[in-house]
């Protein structure tokens, strides 16, 4: 299965270097395409009646990058963590059994 190519518009490769002004009508018409381009790093200024009203651009991650092993030694898993529950507790989870 091949990926669909985006429709041919003036929004194409090389847009990421410049904040391209886009009319509100164009933004509504091509929103999905503009969002994909913004996710790839493009910046757009959305204009209404010739005045800049909003900016559409890539999000920066608000979560720090996860690194394996950072929490080493900070928590402990008991050896019997996966042992069967006592019967009286098991009945609380499975009342029909």
Image (tube, rainbow, N blue to C red):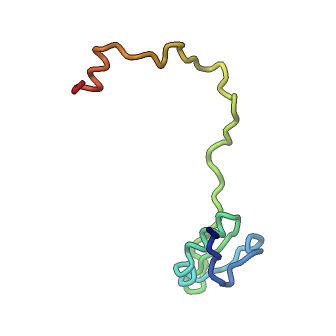
At a point 31% along the width and 17% down the height, the residue shown is: 89
Dividing the picture into quadrants, the one containing residue 3 is bottom right
Q: Is residue 23 left or right of residue 83?
A: right
Instruction: From the top left corner, tell me how far across and down residue 92 is, in percent.
Output: 27, 22
In this orientation, which residue lies closer to the viewer: 13 or 38? Answer: 13
Kindly give the residue lying farthest to the bottom in the view shown. 49
Image quarter in which the N terminus is found: bottom right
Residue found at the very far front of the displayed protein: 1
Residue at image position (53%, 14%) is 78
Front residue of 73 and 44: 73
Residue 9 x/y as whole percent = 66, 84
Q: In this rendering, would 27 be left or right of 89?
A: right
Please name the residue shown 55% across and 86% down the image: 49
Foreground pick, 23 / 6: 6
In the image, is residue 25 above or below residue 17? below
Q: Quadrant of the C terminus?
A: top left
């Amino acid at each position: 299965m091949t990926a669909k190519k985006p429709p041919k518009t003036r929004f194409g490769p090389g847009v990421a270097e410049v904040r391209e002004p886009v009319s509100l009508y164009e933004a509504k018409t091509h929103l999905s395409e503009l969002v994909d381009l913004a996710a790839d790093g493009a910046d757009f200024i959305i204009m209404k009646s010739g005045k800049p009203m909003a900016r559409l651009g890539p999000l920066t991650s608000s979560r720090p990058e996860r690194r394996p092993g950072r929490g080493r030694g900070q928590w402990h898993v008991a050896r019997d963590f996966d042992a069967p529950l006592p019967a009286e507790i098991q009945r609380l989870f499975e009342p029909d059994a």
